[in-house]
Amino acid sequence: MENDVRELLVAQLKDAYSAEKQALRAMQKSVRQASDPTLKDCITLHIEQSQAQIEKVEQALESLGAKPGRVVCEAMRGLVEEGTHEMEDHEKGPILDLVIVASMQRIEHYEIAAYGTDIALAQALGEGTVVALLEEILAEEKQTDVKLTEVTQSSLMAAAMGGAAANDAKSGGKRKAS
């Protein structure tokens, strides 16, 4: 049974590796589309963290005698694809910034759930090194989620609400449907 749990953890970490790489590429696109400077800074910081997180997942896999392989995280693929489609529906500005945050937070929540499970598996196996690496990643993912909420509450929502009212007045109440 322990071997089955070890195999599950390895499979989950390979999935996490793929998820991190896909999320990284999505953030690299999002940072170019974002307007708000604080949001851009938040995304840039998380890009740097994600690059280090990819290395940590590689270290965790190596600690278990495995390599990332060519697994594709289908859940992350779907989250990234959904976010990309939503972003295409909006022009650069406060509404697009909110769409970027919404997409990033869905990704963060997926990663938080996945790393929580991975930590539990590693703890059950007594893999302290893996637990420590994954706990660092999980803390960063949670911190990013909080920062995205703070950015939304401190500036993005007000800009979007003001922008929406101004755009309504200019267009006679007509907005691009999403």
Image (cartoon, rainbow, N blue to C red):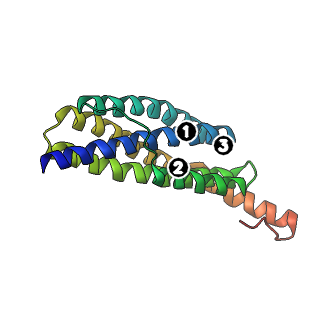
Q: Which badge, 2 or 1, is on the more N-terminal residue?
A: 1
Position of the C terminus, as image quadrant, is bottom right
Q: Is residue 119 left or right of residue 17?
A: left
Crowd band around label 2 with a 10 angstrom C-alpha radius: few (<14), some (14–19), many (20+): many
Which residue is located at x 62 percent, y 42 percent? 30
Amino acid at circle 3? Ala
Camera-nearest label, 2 or 3: 2
At numbered mark 2, what does the secondary structure look like: helix, strand or loop? helix
C-alpha span from label 2 to label 1 = 9 Å
Crowd band around label 3 with a 10 angstrom C-alpha radius: few (<14), some (14–19), many (20+): many
At numbered mark 1, what does the secondary structure look like: helix, strand or loop? helix
* Residue receiving disc 2: 104
Determine whether 128 is above or below 151 in the image.
above
Q: Nearer the viewer, residue 110 or 157?
A: 110
Q: Which badge, 2 or 3, is on the more N-terminal residue?
A: 3
The part of the image, by quadrant, that contains residue 31 is: top right
C-alpha span from label 2 to label 3 = 12 Å
Q: Is residue 33 visible?
A: yes
* Residue receiving disc 3: 34
At numbered mark 3, what does the secondary structure look like: helix, strand or loop? loop
Evaluate if marks 2 and 1 touch, with contact meaning CB atoms under 8 Å apart: yes
Q: Nearer the viewer, residue 156 or 53?
A: 53
Q: Is residue 94 left or right of residue 68?
A: right
Amino acid at circle 1? Ile
| Numbered circle sitting on residue 61 | none
Evaluate if marks 3 and 1 touch, with contact meaning CB atoms under 8 Å apart: yes
Amino acid at circle 2? Met
| Numbered circle sitting on residue 43 | 1
- How many numbered marks are there? 3
Which residue is located at x 26 percent, y 45 percent? 9
